[in-house]
Image (tube, grey):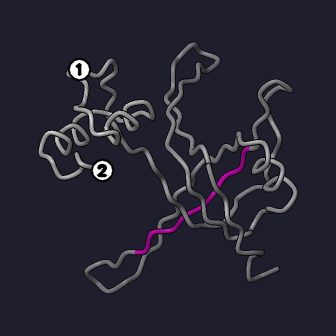
Amino acid sequence: MLRMLATKSFIKYLLVRPVIIPQCRQMCSGQEPPAKVVSNLEKSINRITLLGRVGIDPQLRGSDASPVVVFTLATNHNYRFETGEIQQKTEWHRISIFKPHLRTTVSQNVRKGHRVFIDGRLVYGEIIDARGLAHTTSTIVASDVICFGASPEA
């Protein structure tokens, strides 16, 4: 039986330290947790969720060793001025897909104007322009893409 689950030391151990499989087996066997964990990696969250319209047909880029499918996604934000006038602002996002099966599915089925849901993470990079100046870039690396179909005009 799991005798340690209710002890304060076990709860503190779970909240403060990462748990790996050998440690789980040790804890579930009723033994006290080790005094010090070798790795003290913190958990963090880098998650982006977008719902919008595809700006360009997905394009296969990169090399044979590291292929990537890229496209842009437009999301809109509506706001109202004090006068009552409604304004819409469009934000453009660069989407990159590295997962092999998802890359293939998106390149074959998603087209400009399709409404898609993107789940992924935000990644920053740097490019050097022709003048030698560095510019920071941002990309959404998609882990899941759900396509809702073509635009209403299609």
Question: In the image, 24: left or right of 104?
Answer: left
Whole-percent x, y for residue 142 in the image = 62, 49
Q: Give, as a three-letter code, the residue at label 1.
A: Lys
Give SS at disc 1.
loop
The extreme front residue here reads 1
The magenta-colored residue range is 70-78
Q: State left or right for residue 12 relative to residue 82.
A: left
On the rendered image, what quadrant is the C terminus found in?
A: bottom right
Above or below, comparing residue 151 to residue 69 in the picture: below
Where does label 1 land, which residue? 36
**Crowding near pointer 1: few (<14 within 10 Å), some, many (20+)?**
few
**Which residue is the site of mark 2?**
2
Which quadrant of the structure image shows residue 149?
Answer: bottom right
Answer with left or right where residue 83 lies relative to residue 62: left
Q: Residue at x 14, y 39 (%)?
A: 9
Q: Secondary structure at mark 2?
A: loop
